[in-house]
Image (cartoon, rainbow, N blue to C red):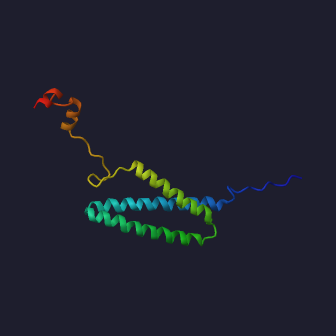
Amino acid sequence: MAQPTKRRPILGFAQAAVYTVIVLAILVVLNFLTAALIITYTIRVSLNALMAGVMFGFMLRLAMLTVAVVLLRKLSWIEDIPLLFTVLITHIGLLIWETRYVSMSLAYPGLKPRATKREALRQQQGPSIPVKEAGAA
């Protein structure tokens, strides 16, 4: 008589690891969305408010994430190793995405400045004075 095969857990962890990854990934995304909201609201006030919001917002978000992880670790279905790697990898991944694709400068928050029509025409036409005449002047 054939014995039923036992399901092997993924990478040594059971379904709890999958639930851990899902919950922590949601927490990390919420962390970054909170950072975006803080930047969005403080940039409307002033540059000093933006800097204070980013600095204190980071400390507040880090404290909230720490409290969430400490509380989640007490649950029976949370695995420690997937928890650690999920927080680490998703934060690093989102930081790389943010630095690569989010364009922000203090002069134009979230926007790339457009060239005016006059500047665009100058670029198309080239220099207005020929090089030989410019040297003679």
Residue displayed at 68% across by 60% down: 14
Tag count: 0
Q: Is residue 7 left or right of residue 66?
A: right
> Is residue 3 shown above or below 112?
below
Based on the displayed image, in which of its 4 quarters is residue 57 positioned? bottom left
Residue displayed at 61% across by 66% down: 80
Residue 32 in the image, given as x and y percentages of width and height: 43, 59
Q: Is residue 124 left or right of residue 54?
A: left
Residue 2 in the image, given as x and y percentages of width and height: 86, 52
Residue 15 in the image, given as x and y percentages of width and height: 66, 59
Q: Quadrant of the C terminus?
A: top left
Seen as rendered, the residue at the extreme right is 1
> Is residue 101 shown above or below 128?
below
Residue 107 in the image, given as x and y percentages of width and height: 26, 53
Seen as rendered, the residue at the extreme left is 137
Q: Is residue 81 left or right of residue 103?
A: right
Q: Is residue 9 left or right of residue 115?
A: right
**In this view of the protein, which residue sits in the foreground, 55 or 71?**
55
**In this view of the protein, which residue sits in the foreground, 103 or 33?**
103
Seen as rendered, the residue at the extreme front is 136
Residue displayed at 38% across by 58% down: 36
